[in-house]
C-alpha cells in the first residue's frame, strides 16, 4: 500500500492511500485540498503511478533482504 500524507504543525490534514484510490481530508483545509486534488485526474494518476514506481519496484528488494 502506498500512502502519501501531508502535515502541518504535526497535524495530518490530507492523505492519499492507494487502497482507497483518492485523497482524504482530516481537517477543513484538508477536505478542501482533497476535493480539489480528487477532481484533477492528472494528480490522481500521478499518485497511483507512485505505487507502481516506488512500492512495486522495491518490494522484491525488501523480501530478498529478509
Image (spheres, rainbow, N blue to C red):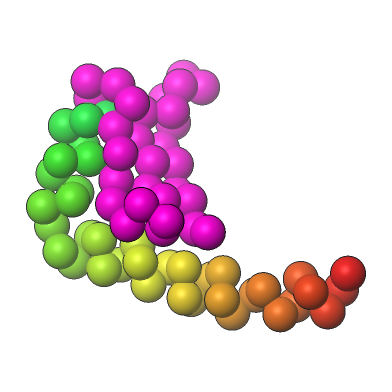
| Location of residue 54 in the rendering, given as x and y in whole percent from the top left corner | 54, 71
**Left or right, residue 54 beside residue 19:** right
| Location of residue 1 in the rendering, given as x and y in whole percent from the top left corner | 53, 59
22 in relation to 46, above or below: above
Image point (41%, 51%), residue name: 17
38 in relation to 41, above or below: above
| Location of residue 5 in the rendering, given as x and y in whole percent from the top left corner | 44, 41
| Location of residue 4 in the rendering, given as x and y in whole percent from the top left corner | 45, 49
Image point (19%, 49%), residue name: 37
Q: Does the magenta-highlighted stretch encompass residue 7?
A: yes
Q: Does the magenta-highlighted stretch encompass residue 48?
A: no
19 in relation to 61, above or below: above
- Name the residue at the right extreme: 66
Residue 18, quarter of the rendered image: bottom left
Tell me which segment is drawn in magenta. 1-29
User: Total label count?
Assistant: 0
Image point (29%, 32%), residue name: 25
Quarter of the image that includes the C terminus: bottom right
Amino acid at each position: 500500500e502506498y500512502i502519501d500524507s501531508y502535515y502541518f504543525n504535526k497535524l495530518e490534514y490530507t492523505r492519499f492511500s492507494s487502497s482507497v484510490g483518492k485523497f482524504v481530508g482530516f481537517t477543513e483545509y484538508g477536505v478542501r485540498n482533497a476535493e480539489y486534488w480528487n477532481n484533477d485526474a492528472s494528480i490522481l494518476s500521478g499518485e497511483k503511478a507512485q505505487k507502481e514506481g516506488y512500492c512495486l519496484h522495491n518490494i522484491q528488494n525488501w523480501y530478498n533482504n529478509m
